[in-house]
Image (tube, rainbow, N blue to C red):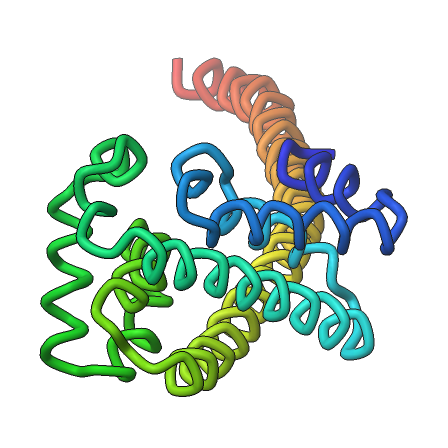
Amino acid sequence: MTFISDVLAAVGSLPKPLLVLVTGALVLGECTIGLGFLVPGESGLLIASAAVTDLGFFFVLAGVVAVCATVGDNIGFWLGRRYRLKMRETKVVRKLGQQHWDRAGQLLRKWGIGAVLVGRFLPVVRTLMPAAAGTSGMSYPKFAVSSLIGAIAWSATHVSIGWLAGASAKYIEDALGRTSWILMAAVVVIGVSIWLLRRRRGTKQPEVAAAEEPAKDVAA
């Protein structure tokens, strides 16, 4: 087995409920402001999604991830509503990068609730966007709807990518395994053919030399 197979096998061997629980916790942590720079939610989601083998588990994992992402967004929104403009100067935002906070604000001013959808697919910005939306004074119903739609789209997209990547990795490794056997067989056949050809030529040379000797004697 290769390294990719080992990783996929380790992930796939986890009990499905535990896998869903851990993945949901990682996503919740990443989408909650203050934890986004500590928790590898997106990476964990892609790795976990590689263990998806059927539509049933796909919908379960994608649904749980979407709910956890939405909960994380809501926490960020209400923190932004609570602290308003002070959020930009907090240690958390400085740690994540104030330029990302400013970018989130620019998107909100330009696109409104559409920025919440777009921001979901932008690294770091998706962690700050909910708090920035709360700070901007956006109404909660609008934010909640856009956050839920964005979370569902983001979750379905990443679970699909992980599923396809896992299936592709397994297919490629299987194909490479079959190809290696074919190449090995071809090398053996070619090697044996060359050896037989050389051996045949080697036996013919003494016969030709022996046939030429009488001809030389007659000429003399």
| View extreme (front): residue | 82
Please say if 189 is above or below 141.
above
Please say if 97 is above or below 56.
above
Q: Quadrant of residue 108?
A: bottom left
Which one is in front, 185 or 142? Answer: 142
Residue 41 appearing in the image: yes
Task: Measuring from the top left, give residue 51's x and y in whole percent.
Answer: 73, 55
Please say if 9 is above or below 203.
below
Q: Quadrant of residue 184?
A: top right
Q: Quadrant of residue 110?
A: bottom left
Task: Measuring from the top left, give residue 136's x and y in whole percent.
Answer: 21, 69
Residue 193 shown left or right of residue 9 in the figure: left
Residue 189 appearing in the image: no
Question: Which residue is at 27% across, 38% downward?
Answer: 96
Residue 165 shown left or right of residue 139 in the figure: right
Which one is in front, 202 or 212? Answer: 202
Question: Which residue is at 33% across, 57% downward?
Answer: 80
Which quadrant of the figure contains the C terminus?
A: top left
Residue 44 shown left or right of residue 215 in the figure: right
Which one is in front, 46 or 126? Answer: 126
Which one is in front, 51 or 16? Answer: 16
Question: Which residue is at 39% across, 36% downward?
Answer: 37
Please count the marks in the image: 0
Task: Measuring from the top left, give residue 21's x and y in whole percent.
Answer: 76, 51
Question: Which residue is at 67% across, 34% downward?
Answer: 2
Which quadrant of the figure contains the N terminus?
A: top right
Task: Measuring from the top left, give residue 33's x and y in whole percent.
Answer: 41, 47
